[in-house]
Image (tube, rainbow, N blue to C red):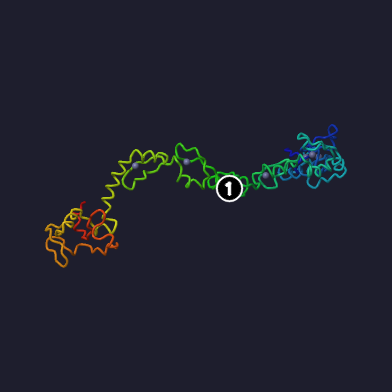
Amino acid sequence: MATSNNGTYGGYSYNFVTCDPPDEYLCHICTLVARDPQQVTCCSNIYCKSCLDTLKEKGQGFICPTCRSSLEGKYFKDGRVERGIKSLKVYCTNTDSGCQWKGTIKDIDTHLHSCPYQLVPCTNECGAMIRRSSLKTHLTDNCTQRIVNCQYCKQRGTYQLITSSSHFDECPDLPIQCSNEGCNEKILRHSLASHNETCPKAIVPCEYNTVGCNKKMKREEQEKHNEESMKHHLDIAMKKIDALQVTVLLPRKHVLKLNQYTQLKEEEEDWCSPGPGKERVTRGEVSKHGWGYSKFIVHAALRHNPSQVFQYRKDDSLYFKVTSKAKPWLAL
Ligand SMILES: [Zn+2]
Ligand SMILES: [Zn+2]
Ligand SMILES: [Zn+2]
Ligand SMILES: [Zn+2]
Ligand SMILES: [Zn+2]
Ligand SMILES: [Zn+2]
Ligand SMILES: [Zn+2]
């Protein structure tokens, strides 16, 4: 028959202070000191109440294991034996852990409710069984359910949550190694983006990328690159400026420039439209071959101060309007 030490099933398996307990106190089923002892009328033997109940529930015949008589209604609680058993002296079940207590079986339950060596479930319900004397320390220092502040962002939560990867994955103040090769700085997560704006190891495009330099480099190499590529940058910038002139005032398809008319204007010669017929550009004329006056944009329409900008800008270009069909000859 299985025994369960100091649970509520089977007999008592305490360590007795004075040698072995008398045979008359032993259960004839579990062989331990009987718990809630019952005396059977057949052979007067003693059994634990729970051992008899188990025997009955098994359904293999409720008969006395000693004399094979039927036990149905043939046993009674033995008060005298119980008093004897309850006054047996035992050691605390936590002797191995260091408890010095010894006392009667009658008193041991009371003792165990305050025994500092007794294992009790954590009151924070973390699932751990903790020695009663260590519970306080456990709750403040070790329990996974204790409330702590994140050491970085100071967020409050259970130790389990705050130290979990799900918190570290989003903790805004967690120091993270800058991912730019060669940068050893540790940056708080929320500052990563702004650090990258200044990180000397961040890969950035050349400052002249808008005018066509496609080189990429570490930010710290920018200055050197600018020094080394000054002429190249200047060249491409000039080309870009040339190409951009006509687009700064109005959409590209309407505004163009014609450098070659500069000279004509200075010499007060007639202007000819750049069309195939090269007609003179004169107000009111209807063009037959070239594009004529009507295709030019009125200077006022450029929305610049005419006294400052006039018809020619600093690049000596004439701006005028054409339809998109006219594009082919617009090449600068
Ligand atoms: Zn028993
Ligand atoms: Zn019997
Ligand atoms: Zn104890
Ligand atoms: Zn706990
Ligand atoms: Zn945090
Ligand atoms: Zn960095
Ligand atoms: Zn460059």
- Which of the two residues, 29 or 41, is positioned nearer the viewer here? 29
Residue at image position (74%, 45%) is 56
Q: Tell me which image quadrant ligand 3 sits in.
A: top right
Residue 120 horizontal/vertical position (percent): 72, 43
Q: Is residue 134 left or right of residue 190?
A: right
Which amino acid, by three-letter code, is at mark 1?
Answer: Cys
Residue at image position (48%, 47%) is 194
- Which of the two residues, 40 or 128, is positioned nearer the viewer here? 128
Give residue 314's quadrant in the image: bottom left
Q: For the N terminus, which image quadrant?
A: top right
Instruction: Residue at the far bottom: name it.
Output: 284
Residue 317 horizontal/vertical position (percent): 23, 55
- Which of the two residues, 181 or 126, is positioned nearer the viewer here? 181
Return the residue at label 1: 153
Q: Is mark 1 within 8 Å of ligand 5?
A: yes
Instruction: Residue at the far front: name it.
Output: 267
Residue 142 horizontal/vertical position (percent): 67, 42
